[in-house]
Amino acid sequence: MNDDFRLKLIKIRDEKIAHRDELLEMKMRAASAKQVSGDIDIDGMIAHEQLAIDNLDDAIARLN
């Protein structure tokens, strides 16, 4: 059972990493285009995704 749960956590972590990478790409494009979007807190979203990734990494490590 732990293996199934661990694999699900790994899949979720991979999705979070992909989403964080998309946000980083959006941030880079906005910076290069010198766009200012005050309505969207991309840095906050990136930090939120990174925290989720770190928590998932900890949970996966405990299941090993």
Image (cartoon, rainbow, N blue to C red):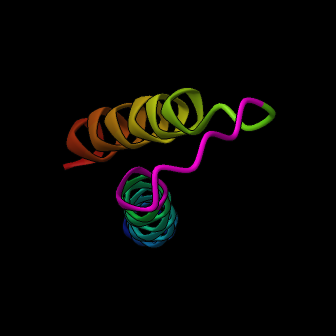
- Kindly identify the residue that appears in the image at 81 percent across and 33 percent down: 39
Q: Using the image, determine if residue 43 lies above or below residue 64.
A: above
Residue 16 drawn at (x, y percent): 49, 59
Residue 57 drawn at (x, y percent): 28, 42
State how many labels appear: 0
Residue 51 drawn at (x, y percent): 43, 29
Residue 35 drawn at (x, y percent): 57, 50
Please state which of residues 16 and 44 is positioned toward the viewer in this rendering. 44
- Kindly identify the residue that appears in the image at 48 percent across and 37 percent down: 52
- Kindly identify the residue that appears in the image at 45 percent across and 29 percent down: 47
Residue found at the far right of this picture: 39
Magenta span main SS? loop
Quarter of the image holding residue 61?
top left
The answer to if 49 sits in the magenta stretch is no
Please state if 43 lies on the left or on the right of 37 as rendered: left
Q: Using the image, determine if residue 42 lies above or below residue 16.
A: above
Task: Please provide the residue range marked out in magenta.
Answer: 30-38
Please state if 18 lies on the left or on the right of 44 as rendered: left
Please state which of residues 62 and 41 is positioned toward the viewer in this rendering. 41
Quarter of the image holding residue 32?
bottom left
Please state which of residues 12 and 7 is positioned toward the viewer in this rendering. 12
